[in-house]
Amino acid sequence: MRDNTYIKLESICKKYKGYVRTQKLLEEGFSNRQIAFLTKDGYLEKICYGVYWINGRGYDKPLDYKCIEVCLSAPRAVICMDSAFYYHGAIATEPGCLSVATERTDRSVLNMNFPVKRHYFSKNNFEIGLKKIETEYGRYSIYDIERSVCDIVRLESRDIAEIINEIYKNEYQRKRLLKYAELLRVKQIH
């Protein structure tokens, strides 16, 4: 490949800050063949169908890249449960598998470069506790801590007493947790 192709790729990296869609690469003058060669040579990393990460100088993936990449693949996906705890800072260790919630009717493919555990939620409860996070690299959706506590108690029956005790120290969070528990029909939180 010609040197000017790599120079053009570096300028695109600065312009798009890492993540770029195939359509944008084509608009910038790259051919499908060049995109395939750049992917094979490691200059582009395929994230999902139609989305690439540009492996450029000075740009590392953000700490929440998994959240961004899942939502690039399935825009209505929501980070949930123990993964939401991690990205909210409630736990220090990143779970080995990213927990993602989608509506029961959503059948979008989640073939990611990291393990993903998918949970299907009814349309009635899907929006409860949902927050949108905007970053310079992209946006993603995540459930708040109180919703995640209810989901873990309801779906995985795990003991998360440490996180619940931390939430109970804050009266506002405690009221929200109890409200979510009622809406999501969680029998017992503590």
Image: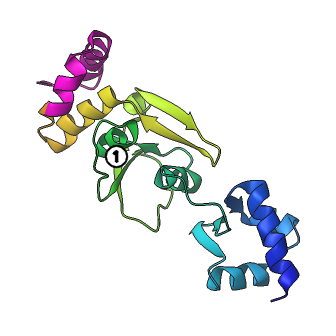
* Left or right position of 118 against 136: left
Q: Quadrant of the C terminus?
A: top left
Q: What's the residue at 63%, 85% (across, down)? A: 40
Instruction: Report the number of numbered marks.
Output: 1
Q: What's the residue at 78%, 82% (across, down)? A: 34
Q: Position of residue 153 (x, y in %)?
A: 18, 35
* Left or right position of 121 against 127: left
Q: Position of residue 158 (x, y in %)?
A: 13, 42
* Left or right position of 117 against 54: left
Instruction: Determine crowd level at label 1: few under 14, some 14-19, many 20+ residues with C-alpha closer than 10 A.
Output: many
Q: Is residue 39 above or below residue 96?
A: below
Tell me the SS state at disc 1: helix
- Asked which quadrant contains residue 148, the reply is top left
- Span of residues in magenta: 162-190
Instruction: Report the predominant secondary structure element of the magenta stretch.
Output: helix
Q: Position of residue 174 (x, y in %)?
A: 25, 15
Closer to the camera, 184 or 162?
A: 162
Q: Position of residue 87 (x, y in %)?
A: 40, 42
